[in-house]
Amino acid sequence: MKTLIVYNHPYSDSFNHALLEAVIAGAKKAGHEVDVIDLDQDHFDPVMTGKDLLAFRDHQVLDPQAKDYVAHLQAADHLVMLFPIWWELMPALTKGFIDKVIFPGAAYEYTASGYGMRTLLPKLRSTTVITTMNTPKLVYRFVFGNAIKQALLKGTFKKTGMKNIKWFNLTMVKNSTQAKRKKWLTQVEEHFAKK
Ligand SMILES: Cc1cc2nc3c(=O)[nH]c(=O)nc-3n(C[C@H](O)[C@H](O)[C@H](O)COP(=O)(O)OP(=O)(O)OC[C@H]3O[C@@H](n4cnc5c(N)ncnc54)[C@H](O)[C@@H]3O)c2cc1C
């Protein structure tokens, strides 16, 4: 089994980085081969240029970095997306990954009607999104409509035909105790060790 982790955080002593290490440790315990795309370290360009957009129309990925990411995605059995919530949604690099890699002709295709979508990732068994934020869970849910669930889990992954989509949302990270954060790291590692 191959687990692909798409990671987006700009500095290496962050809590997100500790979560990355927990996912890697867990997946390795489960005997998985681990592949990490570090969008910040790669200096991934999230901008969809005019040429990229014309290529979107023609269902051909143009950006060489995005093309390489598509190959990693097509080889994966499990996908993990890990990032902090910024302004209720994902940081720009993760948004760019969605725009330029979850691409027609690469990650999905349209059904005959032209409206429906079906996946082009037959190998992919599951997708797990891990987010961190400072907002309390209920506020994010009832005031901000669980924006990441609507936009990413339903509006992107489910819509393009991905299966077994899960979301772990670690809330009030800044105000949590060190012990609570350590517990989350252990729980995340244990979750991936069981997969
Ligand atoms: C532009 C921007 C917009 C934002 N918008 C929102 C928003 O809309 N809603 C919202 O809720 N939040 C928002 N935030 C806050 C953001 O979601 C949090 O700052 C982020 O999720 C925290 O994750 P981090 O990895 O950056 O944590 P860090 O800041 O790196 O760390 C958080 C805490 O964890 C501790 N820590 C680090 N490593 C470990 C470890 N190994 N074990 C235990 N503890 C550790 C740190 O010491 C610190 O106390 C925004 C932030 C930015 C920059």
Image (cartoon, grey):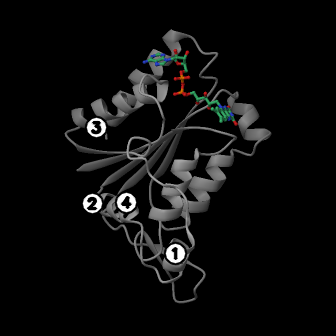
- Badge 3 element: helix
Percent across and percent down for residue 64 are: 36, 65
Q: CA distance from mark 4 to mark 1?
A: 14 Å
Query: Which of the two discs, 1 and 3, sits closer to the camera?
Result: 1
Query: Which of the two discs, 2 and 3, sits closer to the camera?
Result: 2
The front one of 53 and 18 is 53
Residue annotated with mark 4: 65
Residue 51 numbered mark, or none: 1
Residue annotated with mark 2: 75
In this rendering, would 43 be left or right of 90? left
Give the class, few, some or many, for how many residues have Cα within 10 Å of label 3's Cα (few <14, many ≥20). many
Q: CA distance from mark 4 to mark 3?
A: 25 Å
Residue annotated with mark 3: 27
Residue 122 numbered mark, or none: none
Disc with the residue nearer the chain's start (2 vs 1): 1
Query: Which of the two discs, 4 and 2, sits closer to the camera?
Result: 4
Give the class, few, some or many, for how many residues have Cα within 10 Å of label 1's Cα (few <14, many ≥20). few
Disc with the residue nearer the chain's start (4 vs 2): 4
Percent across and percent down for residue 73 are: 34, 59
